[in-house]
Structures are given as structure tokens and as C-alpha cells.
Amino acid sequence: MDDRPDRSEWRPTLGRDNGGVDVRADVGGDAVSARARLCSVLIADDPSIGLATLVHDGFFARWIPEIVDMQMEQDPVHLHKDVLTHTIAVTASTPPELRLRLAALMHDIGKPATHRVGPGGVTFRNHEAVGARITKRRLTGLEFDERFVGDVARLVELSGRFKGFGDGWTDSAVRRYARDAGELLGDLNQLVRYDCTTRHVKKVVALRALVDELEQRIRDLAAADADDRRRPPLSGEEVMALLDIAPGPAVGAAIAMLLAVDESGDEPLDRDQAVERLRQWWADEQAAGQAGQVGRVAQTSGVAGSPR
């Protein structure tokens, strides 16, 4: 049960206490001081007021101007909530971990640059990719660690990947999602889980249930893949039949090769892939064997090397 406070209807209100964080410091200064100020706001239990102050006192205009640009209506016709209000609400809802909070702050930062209104309504095509580039540029300007910058930018880039899961993903799609996230998977799922600021409780519950389902499928597939990798994709009898060879060391070598390929891949080999790899391996082995035999014959006949 998530007991984090509901901040979906947060609105900026300045002048309140922010847990001792000095949110009205000078907006100028060097990048290191600016980074320290931003971090101190983000790791507060509730960063809402601090982030609003960074907008209104010129800090973001100086260091991350795209955040100021997010004070826009998503749909000028229907006047939906602006992107910045949504962003601060999402950031405040996530656990107070710096990488995750920064990713939440930046996850929609590409929307102003990609905002279009057409016959079908408002679109923000490829805003995640654009946002990832902006994130790299701005966090680098604040002199964050290079690897840390890459991690936050990657989370921004992947933040929209979850869309469509509710329509049904294949096992391969689930594996690809987990593989692309890598060690960022936990933060990515947290970001997706809290990227919902509607007042409709049923929608929030439904979204989080989908994230729970995705996480369970990832765990189930990882366990199944681990079991599959402990078994060769082809039996010894199948290897002998496919290669037309008798029992012997070559069969064991073929099985060992298939297991090694299985363990190094993102997904276990299916039968067709295993057959293809086996035949290629056997062709390479035969070619190497024939080359070795030619070399030995040449040495015996005195062709190779110079006579003494």
C-alpha cells in the first residue's frame, strides 16, 4: 500500500517553510553552487515549494530555462493542466532519491519544443528523445557527474516506453523493456508508477496495477530464462543427427558451445536459432581442422619454413 501523500492537485504557493532549505538563494554564482541548491531542494521530503521558488526567482531561467517553458497549457482549446504543474506534482510524489527526482523533473522537458496542435489535437511526438538531449546539456552545464547525467537522460528517454503495455505486450517486448532499462529498471518503474496526477482514484489504481503486472512478468520471465539456460537447446541425439556424426567429444563440444551462446544472449535460443548456430559452428570447426591438417602436411614435406 503506497502511503506517500497525494500531491496530484499541488499548485505553487510561495512564502511557506521548506524544511530549512534556502530556496531563495542568489540565482547566479557558479555551476557547483547552483547544483548544490537544486539538489538540496530535490531531496527534501516535499520539494514542491522549493521547485516553485526556483521557477519564480529566476533560478531555472538561468540554469534550465526549458523548465520555465513548461508553464504552458497542454491543450489551448480544452485548457488542461499545464506541463509544469504536472511535472512538479510527479517529482514531489516520487521517493526522495536524487537520480529519480531529477528524472521526474526532466521527464517532460521536451514537450515545449515538440508541442503541436493539429486536427487530431495536441501532440508531443518524440518528446522523450528531445528531452533526453536537453537533460544531458543542462545537467552537464551544472557539472553533474558524466555517468549520473547519462543515467538521468536515459530515464527521460525511456519514460514513455511503458505506453501500450495495457494493450498487451509479448514476452519479447517485456524482455526488451527490461533489457533497455538495465540497472535503471527500478527507477524507470518508479517513474512510470508516479507519472499520473489525476484526481480519479480508479485511474491511479489501474496504472499502478499495470506496473505491478509488468514487474511480475519481468520476474517470471527472468526465472524462466534462467531455467532454460541450464538446459541445452538441442539434445545430444539431435546434435548427432543434424551433423551426421557418431557419439564422441565433438558432441560434447557442440553442447558446450550452445550453452555458452545461450548464457551470453539476452534471450534463450529457440530451436531454429540453435540449429543455425550449430551448423555454422560445425562448418567453422571443419574448416579449421582442414587448415590444420594442410599445415601439418606442409611441415612434414618441408614446404613450410626454411631448410637448415
Image: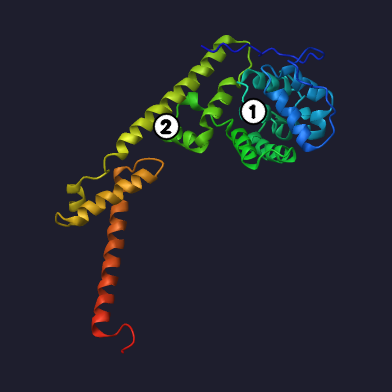
Dot 2 crowding, Cα within 10 Å, few <14, some 14–19, many 20+: few
Q: Is residue 65 above or below residue 47?
A: below
Three-letter amino acid code at the position of disc 1: Leu
The residue lying toward the viewer, choosing from 132 and 30, is 30
Give me the residue at 41% from left, 41% from top: 266
- Residue at left 17%, top 57%? 245
Frontmost residue, 117 versus 21: 21
The single residue placed furthest to the left in the displayed view is 246
List x then y, in percent, for residue 1: 51, 11
Which residue is denoted by mark 2 in the rendering? Answer: 170
Give x and y (percent) for residue 121: 68, 26
Residue assigned mark 1: 98
Q: Quadrant of residue 142?
A: top right
| 1 and 2 marks in contact (CB < 8 Å) | no
Please, what secondary structure does the residue beneath circle 1 have?
helix
Q: Tell me the quarter of the image containing the C terminus.
A: bottom left
In this picture, residue 174 sits left or right of residue 118: left
Kind of residue sitting beneath label 2: Thr
Q: Residues within 10 Å of mark 1 (few under 14, many from 20)?
A: some
- Judge whether 156 appears above or below 207 on screen: below
Which one is in front in this view, the residue at disc 1 or the one at disc 2?
1
